[in-house]
Image (cartoon, rainbow, N blue to C red):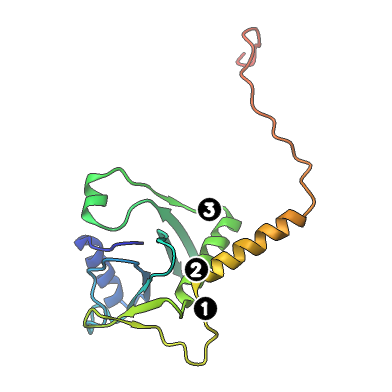
Amino acid sequence: MNSLCDAGIIAALYEASAAGVKIDLVVRGICCLKTGIPGISDNITVRSIVGDFLEHSRIFYFHNNGFEEVYMGSADWMPRNLDKRVEILFPIEDVSLKEEVIHIMDILLRDNKKAREMQADGTYKRVARRGKEPLSAQEYFCEEALANTKRKQHAPHSARKFEPLTPPEENDDFLS
């Protein structure tokens, strides 16, 4: 997401962390949550990825004991968005879409070129990449999109044809 400022959500994240839940957040901009508070937020990491594109997904991925839930939404977690606007949060239920969204989160969390991790004092430091293959999420997604486009250009075209629905005729007795 771009911003995390809502006090109620931050309190809920602290409560989950204190209960032992591991929480990885990717927050591009403003983040009022503090990491590294013993007993409160020591299970929370906050990453910021700032690259060539102004992009911040609003993906919410919950994984508990093999059970996965994935949601996407329109709102940053800020009072003005949650209290004064009409926003939406929806589940990703299609298995292939869910896998694709989880793949996106995995790449974002593995970025070690543009990612910075919040420290306990609120500053951000580069993510350690010693011994790891360099990975920029934005570069990766550009290369992946290009490869997918090339593959689709060379794939045989589908025989499916779009057929629009037509309204019933006045004399059709489809309701009787």
Q: Is residue 130 visible?
A: yes
Graded by Cα atoms within 10 Å as few (under 14), some (14 to 19) or many (20 or more), the crowding at tag 2 reads many
Q: Quadrant of the C terminus?
A: top right
SS under mark 1: loop
Which residue is found at the position 40% from the left and 61% from the top?
A: 54
Q: Quadrant of residue 152?
A: bottom right
Q: Residue 24 appears at what percent x and percent y?
A: 38, 73
Q: CA distance from mark 3 to mark 2?
A: 25 Å
Q: Is residue 8 left or right of residue 17?
A: left
Residue ID for mark 1:
135
Which residue is found at the position 22% from the left and 60% from the top?
A: 6
Name which residue type carries label 1: Leu
Q: Is residue 106 visible?
A: no
Residue ID for mark 3:
93
Q: Residue 71 appears at what percent x and percent y?
A: 44, 56
Extreme residue in the bottom direction: 131
Cβ–Cβ under 8 Å for marks 1 and 2: no
Q: Is residue 99 above or below residue 47?
A: above
Which residue is found at the position 25% from the left and 62% from the top?
A: 9
Name which residue type carries label 2: Gln
Viewer-proximal residue, 176 or 36?
36
Residue ID for mark 2:
138
